[in-house]
Image: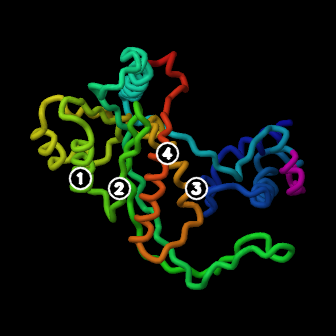
C-alpha cells in the first residue's frame, strides 16, 4: 500500500519536476521512473513494475495524469457584483413586457446583448465539391486543399425585448467599427429610447474615440453594462454566435471575403424574419 501511495503521489506531480521535458505523464514514462527510483525511495516492489499495473493503480484511485481539464480562474475581484448587475438587466427584460401590459408603442428602453466574433475564415475550394451518390458515396466529397481569402469579424447585437438582430460584417473590429455599430443602433431607435448594452471589456468599447462619441450623444441615450473579466459567457449573444457556428459557418466555402460577408448577412436577414426572444434562466432567481 505504501508503494501504491508513493506511485499515486508521483502521478500527481509534473514530470518536469523530475527533469523530464514532458508536460504530462504517460503510463510508460511513469512506470519507467518508478522502476528506476522506487526502490531507492524504499519501495523494492516497484523494481519490476509493469505499465499495465500502473494503469490499474491509477484507475483504482481515479487519477488521470495524461489528461488536462481546463478551468476558469476568476481574476476579476468584482466578479460577483458585476455578474449580479448583468443578471439584473436580464430580470428587468423579463419584467418589462408584464409592466407595459403588451402595449404596441415603442418601449422607452432597448436592451442589446452585443459582442464580436472575430477571425471567421473565408476559405475557398480549389476543386468543386462532389455530390453524394446513392449506394456509392453517402456524403459530399471535398478536396483536402483549399485557398485562404482572409478573415472577417461579425459584430452583432440582439435586442432582448424584440429578438431583432443588429449586425454587420467587417474586416476588423477597432474603435471606428464599434462606433459605426453604435451609429447603426442610434439610427434604429427613436431619440426618446434609452439603449442599454451588455458587452465585454474589449479595448474598443472603452477607448478614447468611443468615449468621445458617447459624450456627444444626449445624456442617457447609451448605457453600457460590462460583463466581468473572463465572464463573457454571461452575455446572451454568445448563444447566437454558437448557433451561427453550428449552422451557416460550419464547413462554409466561399470565393471571396465579399461572398462570406454576403452569406452571413443573408443568415441574419433570415433570422430577423422570425425573431427569437432570448432569455437567461440559470440561477437568475438566486443572484438577480
What range of the chain is rendered magenta? 46-56
The residue wearing badge 2 is 168
- Earlier in the chain: of badge 4 and badge 2, it is 2
Q: Position of residue 243 (x, y in %)?
A: 55, 49
The residue wearing badge 1 is 180
Closer to us: 246 or 193: 193
Q: Residue furthest bottom?
A: 127
- Earlier in the chain: of badge 3 and badge 4, it is 4
Q: What secondary structure is found at the residue carrying circle 1?
A: helix
- Residue appearing at x 20%, y 47% in the figure: 207
**Do we see residue 190 in this rendering?**
yes
Does residue 125 appear to the left or right of 153 in the view shown? right
Q: CA distance from mark 1 to mark 4?
A: 21 Å
The residue wearing badge 3 is 247
Q: Position of residue 69 (x, y in %)?
A: 63, 45
- Earlier in the chain: of badge 2 and badge 3, it is 2
Quadrant location of the C terminus in the rendered image = top left
Residue 239: within the magenta? no
Q: CA distance from mark 3 to mark 1?
A: 27 Å
The residue wearing badge 4 is 240
Amino acid at each position: 500500500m505504501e508503494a501504491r501511495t508513493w506511485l499515486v503521489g508521483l502521478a500527481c506531480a509534473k514530470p518536469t519536476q523530475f527533469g523530464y521535458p514532458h508536460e504530462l505523464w504517460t503510463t510508460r514514462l511513469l512506470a519507467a521512473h518508478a522502476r528506476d527510483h522506487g526502490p531507492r525511495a524504499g519501495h523494492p516492489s516497484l523494481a519490476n513494475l509493469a505499465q499495465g499495473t500502473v494503469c490499474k493503480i491509477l484507475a483504482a484511485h481515479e487519477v488521470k495524469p495524461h489528461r488536462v481539464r481546463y478551468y476558469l480562474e476568476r481574476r476579476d475581484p468584482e466578479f460577483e457584483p458585476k455578474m449580479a448587475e448583468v443578471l439584473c438587466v436580464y430580470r428587468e427584460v423579463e419584467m418589462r413586457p408584464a409592466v407595459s401590459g403588451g402595449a404596441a408603442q415603442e418601449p422607452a428602453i432597448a436592451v442589446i446583448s452585443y459582442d464580436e466574433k472575430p477571425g471567421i475564415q473565408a476559405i475557398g475550394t480549389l476543386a468543386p465539391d462532389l455530390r453524394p451518390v446513392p449506394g456509392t458515396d453517402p456524403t459530399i466529397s471535398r478536396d483536402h486543399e483549399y485557398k485562404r481569402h482572409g478573415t472577417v469579424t461579425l459584430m452583432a447585437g440582439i435586442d432582448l425585448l424584440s429578438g431583432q438582430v443588429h449586425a454587420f460584417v467587417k474586416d476588423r473590429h477597432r474603435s471606428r467599427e464599434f462606433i459605426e455599430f453604435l451609429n447603426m443602433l442610434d439610427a434604429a431607435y427613436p431619440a426618446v429610447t434609452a439603449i442599454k448594452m451588455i458587452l465585454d471589456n474589449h479595448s474598443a468599447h472603452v477607448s478614447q474615440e468611443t468615449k468621445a462619441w458617447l459624450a456627444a450623444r444626449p445624456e442617457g441615450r447609451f448605457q453600457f453594462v460590462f460583463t466581468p473579466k473572463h465572464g463573457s459567457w454571461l452575455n446572451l449573444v454568445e448563444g447566437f454566435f454558437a448557433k451561427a457556428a453550428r449552422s451557416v459557418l460550419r464547413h462554409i466555402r466561399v470565393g471571396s471575403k465579399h461572398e462570406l460577408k454576403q452569406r452571413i448577412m443573408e443568415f441574419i436577414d433570415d433570422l430577423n424574419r422570425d425573431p427569437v426572444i432570448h432569455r437567461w434562466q440559470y440561477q437568475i432567481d438566486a443572484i438577480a
